[in-house]
Amino acid sequence: MTQHLLRAALLLACLPAWAADDAARDPTAWPPALRSAIAAATAASAASAAAGTDPVDNAIRQVVFANGRAYVVQRGRRYGVGELLDGARIERITEQAVWLREAGQLKREPLYGVVEKRLPAPPPVPASGVKKSKEKP
C-alpha cells in the first residue's frame, strides 16, 4: 500500500512539469523567437513614431491610366504630368517608370525595381540560309 502511495505522490509531483510541456507544445502558439522579434519590431516602430520620424514609404507604387492620361497614385490622390509630387515636378509617366524633375535634375523612378519590360528578341536566322524541314524524304 505504501508503494502505491509513493507512486501516486511521485506522479502528482511530476504533473506540473507535464502541464508546462503541454503548454509549450501548443501548435497555435507562436514560437518564442518569433514573439520576441515581433515585440522588438513593435517597440522600434513605436520609438520612431515617438521620435517624429515619418514611417511612410514615399516610393511610387501605382500608376493608372484614365481618359487617355497617365496618373501617379500616391496616398490616395492622383497626380498628373506637370503636377508637384513631394516637391518634384512630374515630367513623364509610363507603365514602367515615372520621371521627376527636382532641383533641375531629371530622375527616373522605376515602378518595379529591377524588372523591366522589353521587346522579345527576334528569332535567330539560320546561318546557312536553308530552312530545315521536319519532314523526311
Image (spheres, rainbow, N blue to C red):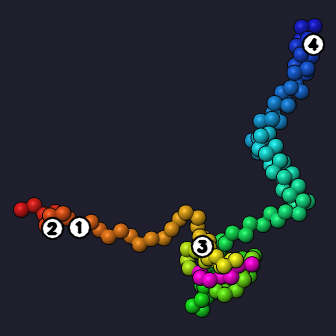
Q: Secondary structure at mark 1?
A: loop
* Residue position for label 2: 129
Q: Return the disc, 3 or 1, that comes first in the chain's sequence.
A: 3
**Residue 89 is a magenta residue:** yes
**Rendering coords of residue 117 (x, y %):** 48, 70
**Could you say which is closer to the camera, residue 109 or residue 118?**
109
Q: Residues within 10 Å of mark 4 (few under 14, many from 20)?
A: few
Amino acid carrying label 1: it is Val
**Rendering coords of residue 114 (x, y %):** 55, 63
* Residue position for label 1: 125
Amino acid carrying label 4: it is Leu
* Residue position for label 4: 5
Residue extent of the magenta highlight:
87-93
**Could you say which is closer to the camera, residue 93 or residue 12?**
93
Decide whether the magenta segment is chiefly helix, strand or loop: strand
**Rendering coords of residue 127 (x, y %):** 18, 63
Q: Residue at the far top: name it.
A: 2
CA distance separating discs 1 and 4: 92 Å
Confirm or deny contact between disc 2 and disc 1 (CB under 8 A): yes
**Residue 117 is a magenta residue:** no
Q: Return the disc, 3 or 4, that comes first in the chain's sequence.
A: 4
Q: Quadrant of the C terminus?
A: bottom left
At horizontal 13% and vertical 67% (from top left) the residue drawn is 130
